[in-house]
Structure formats: structure tokens, C-alpha cells
Image: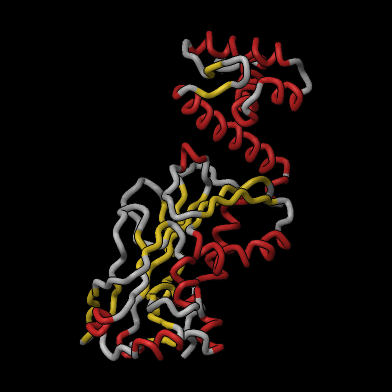
Amino acid sequence: MTHIFDDKQYSGIELFCLAAETGSFTKAALSAGITPAAVSRSISRLEDRLGVRLFVRTTRQIRLTDNGQSYYLKCHDALAQLKEAEREVSGGQATPSGLLRISAPTPYAHFRLLPLLPLFRQRYPDVQFHLHLGNRNVDFAADNIDLAIRMRDPKDSGLIARKLEDVQLATVAAPSYLRRAGTPNHPDDLQQHDCLQFELPSTGKAISWPFMQNGRQVQIETRGSYQCTDDLLGVVTLAKHGAGIIQTYRFMFERELAQGKLVELLPQYSGTSRPVYLLYPHARHMPLRLRVFIEFLLAQLRPSPTVA
């Protein structure tokens, strides 16, 4: 069998990844128990062998070049697979462990995802999380993400997409707003109301509101005095304080509906929903921690089948 790497080359790849992750030759050296000069020499040998620069070096910091970033992502995945293989053959795969990097939109994270994580860690205490919460679609490679949750039908992105659940939409307002402005009886009446607007970060445009009419879904364009971007929780807070009418995910204000702090409007035209998907890259060897986390979410969030 031809040897692709000798021990020194393999060690150099590990040191390179360590320097990329810490952003410092000194920190990488401390972690590896060697000198910064040894780290620098090892990476210089690696650059010479590859014929490219992996880092831009200044007196204060190091930064990955484009080639370095691409090489790091591939080396990181390869080393992770080697570690998983070692755990598998040694019996360590029986216990999921390591870091999961998750991206999720803010509202879904606060109301659906985050409350479940302590339960997951009770079962698998050796798994840690790094959470990216926001409405920006992450780049899996550049942001080093293992799993993303998205609340619309995914475009063909080359990722694996598994449907997690459908979340119901509801149209609500505070009693104080309804006393002041009246109650709409038909979706068309919303043209005469202050409808709180949320702009999608991806388009910069306000979302149209779907309703069911005569067995089909129709889209209603609304307008209002308030527009929010990035954080959907902003329009929910405005609605709670009587600023206007909002349509969004029912799970965000179930408690307020039960307490009478918000009132559901146009229930005869409701019934619309949006899908939630899990997205993750194709991988020949999926880490056990990711596999068990995906199955955990599906078990927790998919509705139980109705028994006749």
C-alpha cells in the first residue's frame, strides 16, 4: 500500500487545523504542547508541499487565505471522520459526543428548538452546541454548520432536506387595538387596518398574508405604520401592545391567546401553514451526535399520528 502521508505530514495537517480554529500560532502551540516556532515551521512545510499560501501573516494575527479556508474545511471534515472511525471500532460510538453547530431562525429557536436542548443533553451530556440564531441563510462550508432549520420550502441547494413539521399561521390583535379600530370580518377588510409588516431579509419585501377562501389559498397584501426587519419577535411585541394586526406562527403567541391578551381574527379563513425543514450536507459518514439529534427533533416535533 502506498503511503499518502507520513506521521510528520499528518501532524502538520492537525496543527494547521488547530491554528485555523484558534487564529493564532501561539494558541495552537499551547494547545499542542509545542513552541510557536515549531507550529510555524510545520505549516511552512505544508505550504511548500501544497505550493500555495494557507495563511496571511501579520505581526499581530494570522488569517486564512481563500485556498487556506477551502483546505481547512476539507481537512476538518477528514479529521472528524477519522475520529468517528476510531470511536466506532473502539466502541466509543455508543455514546454521542462532540460539538454540534446549529443554525435556526430566531422565532423557531426561541419557541421550539431551544426549550428542547436541555432534554437532549440530559440524554447525551457529552454533546455540546454552538448556536447561530438569525434569519440569514448560512453558508454551510464558510460558517462550518452541521445542521440548519429553515421555515420555507428549500431551494435545490444540494443539501439533504427533511421535513420537520408544518407550523400553523394565525392572525391576531390585542383587544385594545380592536376597541380602537374595530374587528375585520373578511380578509379584504385588512386594507382598512394597521397591519404590522415583517420584511424578509432575503428579499427586503414584506410578506403577503395567506388565507383560505372557498377551499383555496389566497394571498392578501397588507400595509401598516410599522415595518420590521430581521427579528420577527419585534412585530409580535408591537401586536401585544396594541399597535396593530399581525399574522405569523401560532406557536409564538399561544399563551397570550389563552390569557386573552391577544384575540384571534378571521378564524373561518385560517388553516394555512408553513413547512419547517432540517437541512444538512451529504456525508458518507454522518457523526453519531448529528444522527441522534436529527432523530430526536423528528420525534419531539413531528405530530403523533392520529389513532382512529
Residue 55 % position (x, y)? 54, 19
Residue 282 % position (x, y)? 44, 45
Number of marks: 0
Say whether residue 185 is visible. yes
Which of these two is toward me, 60 or 193?
Answer: 193
Determine whether 185 is above or below 38 in the image: below
Kindly give the residue lying farthest to the front in the view shown. Answer: 180
Asked if residue 37 lies left or right of residue 73, the reply is right
* Quarter of the figure with the N terminus: top right
Determine whether 43 is above or below 153 in the image: above
Say whether residue 162 is visible. no
Residue 272 % position (x, y)? 34, 77
Residue 165 % position (x, y)? 45, 69
The part of the image, by quadrant, that contains residue 217 is bottom left
**Residue depicted at x 66% and y 43%:** 88
Asked if residue 138 lies left or right of residue 88, the reply is left
**Residue depicted at x 35% and y 58%:** 200
**Residue depicted at x 21% and y 87%:** 214
Which of these two is toward me, 234 or 116?
Answer: 234
Which of these two is toward me, 26 or 223?
Answer: 223
Determine whether 140 is above or below 149 in the image: above
Kindly give the residue lying farthest to the right in the view shown. Answer: 33
The colour mode here is secondary structure
